[in-house]
Structure formats: structure tokens, C-alpha cells
Image (spheres, rainbow, N blue to C red):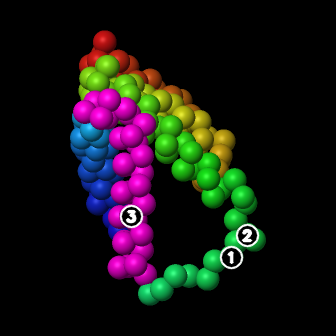
């Protein structure tokens, strides 16, 4: 798939993060519990994912459980739970624009470090002066919009 299409899909994904954050923080407010909203989100997300696997797969692949480190089965889900729950807690208090803007700052900073050091088996993308300037400009822009 060409890079422009992939970048467009990334922007669309950003729209969806804001959409789901707004809808589910509203759910959390109405239920008076961001934890219940997160439970609903993660449960139905699992249901939708299961359906997608059934529809798109030619069957379940043979699982090679011994090649997957134990921690990989649950740590991503744990951080998803934390991120989703915190997002639903913060949005009604900060507003969706501010919560997303500061969340984006965290994503940009951490993803740059993760890429630089090749954490999680990612390809290494060294930080250079150009990247630092871009990172600084992006964070400055986010802060100028929201502070």
C-alpha cells in the first residue's frame, strides 16, 4: 500500500480515537464510572475483533504458544486498559481537546524514544537534529493550541 494511503489511514485512526474517547467518556459519565465504560469498550472490542477474525481468516492458525513470551499475552491488554480508563476519566475533567492534545504529546515523545532505541522489537529510527526540531515543533504546536 502506498505511503500516502497509509498516512491517511493514520489520520483517520486519530479521528476514531477522538470519536471513541468522546462517546465512551460520555458513557463513563452517565454510568458514573470510567471503569465500567472501559469494561464495556474492551469487552465489545474483543467481540468485534473475534468477529473480524472469523470473517477474515481461513480458520484459526496453529498457535505456537511456546514461541510467545508469557508477558506478551497480557501486558498490551493491561496498558490498553490503563490508557482507555484514564482517557475516559480525563476527558470530562479536561475536555476532549486538551486530553487528546496532551495524550498526543505523550505518544510522540514515547514513540520517538521507542523507535530510537528499537524497543519492543521495532526497527531502529535514530533521533537526529531534524527529528528533534520536528518533535519540538510538534509539541510546541500542541501546547500553543491547548494552553
**67 versus 74 height, above or below:** below
Question: Label 2: which residue?
Answer: 67
Query: Which quadrant, please, contains the N terminus?
Result: bottom left
Secondary structure, mark 2, is: helix
**58 versus 77 height, above or below:** below
**40 versus 134 height, above or below:** below
- Extreme-bottom residue of the structure: 58
Q: Please give the name of the residue rendered at 42% of the width and 37% of the height, measured from the top-left corner.
A: 35
Alpha carbon separation for disc pair 1 and 3:
23 Å
Alpha carbon separation for disc pair 1 and 2:
6 Å
Alpha carbon separation for disc pair 2 and 3:
26 Å
Residue 125 is at least partly visible in this image: no
Q: Earlier in the sequence, mark 1 or mark 3?
A: 3
Decide which of 10, 130 is in the foreground and name it. 10
Question: Label 1: which residue?
Answer: 64
Q: Please give the name of the residue rendered at 38% of the width and 33% of the height, measured from the top-left corner.
A: 34
Q: Where is residue 75 in the image (x, y as percent from the top left)?
A: 62, 48
Question: Label 3: which residue?
Answer: 47
Q: Position of residue 18 (x, y in %)?
A: 27, 39
Which image quarter: residue 20? top left
Secondary structure, mark 1, is: loop
Residue 42 is at least partly visible in this image: yes
For the residues carrying marks 1 and 3, which lies nearer the camera in this image? 3
User: How would you rate the neighbour count of disc 2 (Cα within 10 Å): few for under 14, some for 14-19, many for 20 or more?
Assistant: few
Decide which of 122, 55 is in the foreground and name it. 55
Write the start and end of the magenta stretch as one range.
Answer: 28-57
User: How would you rate the neighbour count of disc 3 (Cα within 10 Å): few for under 14, some for 14-19, many for 20 or more?
Assistant: few
Which image quarter: residue 112? top right
Residue 38: in magenta span? yes
Decide which of 54, 18 is in the foreground and name it. 54
Contact (Cβ within 8 Å) of mark 1 with mark 2? yes
- Extreme-top residue of the structure: 147
Amino acid at each position: 500500500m502506498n505511503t500516502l494511503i497509509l498516512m491517511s489511514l493514520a489520520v483517520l485512526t486519530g479521528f476514531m480515537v477522538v470519536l471513541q474517547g468522546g462517546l465512551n467518556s460520555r458513557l463513563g459519565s452517565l454510568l458514573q464510572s470510567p471503569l465500567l465504560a472501559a469494561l464495556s469498550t474492551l469487552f465489545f472490542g474483543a467481540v468485534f475483533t473475534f468477529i473480524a477474525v472469523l470473517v477474515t481468516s481461513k480458520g484459526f492458525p496453529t498457535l505456537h504458544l511456546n514461541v510467545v513470551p508469557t508477558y506478551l499475552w497480557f501486558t498490551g491488554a493491561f496498558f490498553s486498559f490503563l490508557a482507555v480508563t484514564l482517557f475516559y476519566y480525563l476527558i470530562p475533567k479536561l475536555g476532549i481537546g486538551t486530553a487528546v492534545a496532551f495524550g498526543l504529546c505523550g505518544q510522540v515523545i514515547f514513540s520517538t524514544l521507542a523507535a530510537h532505541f528499537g524497543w519492543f522489537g521495532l526497527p531502529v529510527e535514530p533521533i537526529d537534529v531534524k527529528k528533534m526540531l520536528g518533535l519540538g515543533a510538534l509539541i510546541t504546536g500542541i501546547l500553543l493550541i491547548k494552553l
